[in-house]
Image: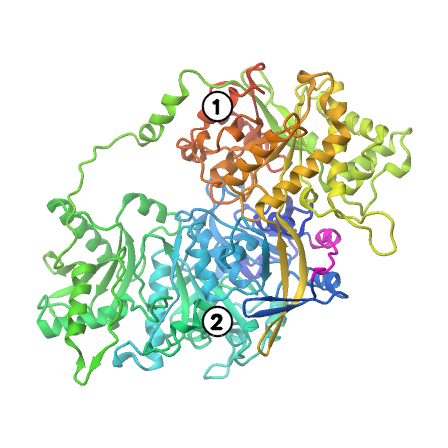
Amino acid sequence: MREWLYGNSTSVPLRIRIAPSPITRSEADLLHVASPRFAYRVYLSEDGTTFVNARRLKRLLRSVPKWAPPSSASVEMEGKYTFRYDSTAEAKALIEKVSRSSCIADSFLSRPIWLSDATFELLSVDLGAAYGERESLVGSPYVKSVRIGPGLCAQAACFMSVLLCGSFARAVHDFAEISCIGSGHDPSSEGKITFAGMHAGQILTYLNSRAVGLAAELQGWDLSLAADAIANTKIKCEYVNMAVRAYVRSGFPVIYLVEAGPLWNKKDEVGHSLGQIHEPPLPILDRRLIDRLPQNKVSNEDDHHAVVVVGYRADSGDMENVEFIIHDPSSLPFVRVSGKRLFQNRITIDCSLFGDPTLIAGGNVPVPSQWCVIPVVPDAVKVTLLDRHTQKRIGSTGLIAWSIEVQSLCEKYKMWGRESPMADGSDFYLVAMNEDQRIKLTNHRSGFSGSNSGQLQSAIEAISKEAHRIGRRLPDWNWFEIVTDCVDKNASCAVWVWDATQELPPHPLDHDDNGRSESSDHLLRTVIEQSLIGVVVTRAESTEVMWGFECTNVTLKNVPDQDFKTILNGSANESIGKGSPKVKLSLITSFCGKGFKSATEAWPEAIHGKRPDAEVYCFMERDLLDLQNWFASTESLNAKWIPGKSEEVVQWMSRCCNESKVITSCGQFIDYHLRKNNISVTGLASYFPHVTHEDAKPAIGESAPGSHGRHLAVQALVFLARLARELRERGHKSLRSIELVAGSRVTALWPAIQEFKTKRISVVRASYLSAEDAGDRLLNTLEQSIEKCRSVLLGNGEEDRIRFGIECEPGQMFTIGRVEWAQRLAEKIQCSRVLRDFVCINLDLAHAMLLGLTQPAQFGDAVTRNVINVHLSGHSPLFHFGDSSLAWYIFSMSESFGLRNWLHVISRNEKHVQSGEVPVSVEFEAAKSGQYVRDSVSAFVEWVGKF
């Protein structure tokens, strides 16, 4: 890939490091494995501006559980589908699917060398800080899914599209969450997800959901409602291409629904396939994979495919053959393809997929033509360029079709007298008139491009200035239609400005013998009255603004310039009062010896006369490798307790939970590496997906439970409790908590055959618990652990007590993925005689931001008064990409979050009153450079005031 994109020789070694990946992290949670959650980050350029997060497939294959099929039935019915399970081949089939996955998980790619020409316009986004690389790093996201279904291209397309609209989205979701939200499942109840391709209706359900906060419509061209002039396929293709280019040029991605095989291998008029003519030539491996795709269209849903249009060629000739740049999640990024090829290989959508089939049965509403594109835009944008499919009415006419109709009305009634929109000579731009929205758009493009960009800028300035002069408020979003083929030959162009925030009325379906009826004319006039803001006419010596019939007339409020931060922080500062909370700062480090060494060397020597302590993450795969060497040097330790080469961390901890010599040796290991650097341990952190597993049963022919099940988590938690006690006895008196991620709601995955009529495709089904049942299972796991080690946790009394701190992990498929679930769990803890003395909340403030919280009161007293420890990181407010530096731009977002207010509230709960300190651990992805850590800690100290 590096050679194909950037021309680097394959003989030049790649730079690689272990790093977080949002995709591998979510796959680990889905597959119920503790490792590998991190990926290999492979840098494709020397300056680190482009990289791929690569799956550790061999490690993943060793960890994938071998689930049995559902015991209740070998056949299940859900909606129109039948699912059949094969009890003899389930585990093998799942392993085989995973083994065929691409090593590419998610990637962040800069512009390829063969798209460096200024004629190519590409969408981009700044994710440098989110990925923990640098504060500003602009590129294009590209992902491939793990193969646990017939193809998750729609989920991948949704993921990339939301990232490219990240400035306007509420959150980004992983593939399991996308499938769940798109299927319309109740997020709190139990159920099953089918990992297969999502149809267009599910894509729309996801993108338009409140969780995402964007707007998307399935668009195409409804021939039954369109003017006769555009009835032929060539002109229809040109208008679809015009719309796609307009959205991408305005800064927004478009999901294009195609058929995978024909897109790549169907011959064009001169006998060439895309795979044969692509420049530069495709990599050999990808070429072989593409050659296996069918050449002709098939009706099987399995061939339906989704790609994302992320760019276009500005100097393309005729509109039919405009060249687009697409990300294809099944093959390659930055693929060059003509709009004509995309349009010819679009899929036909069955309207019954969108809801009640009776919407189109037995009525006079005509069945729509093919709908093929899904532009993704901010939720305030309601007007589409092309006709859109709706559940209420088959065919809601888009702006392009209405523009053509308005032309005929202008001629009939001599409206405006001189100019009328002529779509075949038009160019469309979606423009943000609000300053905040314009700033957000700069994250996706530097400015408008195209031959008409100059006229556009002039029109924006002219109508904005005139609106301000007369006291009119323009809508936040407008479509600017540039018409260069004007009736008035003295005018160089006319720019028609349409309100993009108010839906256009439905198109009239009634016709008379002479063409449009009077009711049609009335609707056309209504469109102009409701949607046309005005027309900006440019002549040689003047620019004139003409307003529409009833343009929205809202007097602009005279808002003086104010310090925005002062406005945001006014109420928060009042509640904070004087002073800042006292904080005991620590940094999270990997347990392994190499991690200790590099981390402690990078940590600041002294800030305000103190050095941060450590919260130790136990354990990762690397930990066992270091422990093997450490234990080998301990003569008193029996060789059987040394971790095996293929042994999972949780399995080893489980079998060693009652071995005092092993735990003592682990304590010596940690104490040795930290004490020599004057660092004390303040807590242990862990992740065991097994905490919400079912109780394990022995496999056939065996007497002991297998390698998966809650018994492993119970015993591993006992191990950590005893290790924490060992460290306290070695002088680490600040160690008071063991942080535990609350686990996943997913209980199992099974390959199955999905049947519908004569179609049979191979899919994977995932079952998941209700949020309440998952929470109860987590609490039951903790109860069992506490009963086994109560005296170890209690120590010599209250001041010596060690507690478990469970952490919320935002997301639909996590046990504590929503605010109300956390509140319910906290209340149950307080009502439990066993739990209330030993289980608390580990509050991750970055996760609280992802949950949409801004003030502690939104979490409720049951949560905030029971916080034992706080985690703080600088990751993106949209998604957990990685743990970044606490950069100033993240703190500027956190001003409204009221960081100090949160810490003040937590400092008042009974667990911290006596010490007067709130323990705060700053998260990093493994060990960062010294300057990176110093900058983050300095920023934290300056923000909080002291620690």
Q: Amino acid at mark 2?
A: Val
Position of residue 531 relative to residue 43, above or below, is below
Magenta residues span 57-72
Residue 460: x, y in percent?
21, 52
In the rendered image, which quarter is residue 821 located in? top right
- Identify which residue is drawn at 35% across, 61% down: 247
Position of residue 527 relative to residue 32, above or below, is below
Residue 214: x, y in percent?
39, 53
The quarter in which the N terminus is drawn is: bottom right
Task: Tell me, yes or no, whether the highlighted magenta stretch contains residue 70.
Answer: yes
Q: Residues within 10 Å of mark 2 (few under 14, many from 20)?
A: many
Q: Amino acid at mark 1?
A: Val
Q: Earlier in the sequence, mark 1 or mark 2?
A: 2
- Between the C-alphas of marks 1 and 2, the distance is 53 Å
Residue at which label 1 appears: 905
Check residue 258 in the rendering and tell me which mark sits there, or answer none: 2
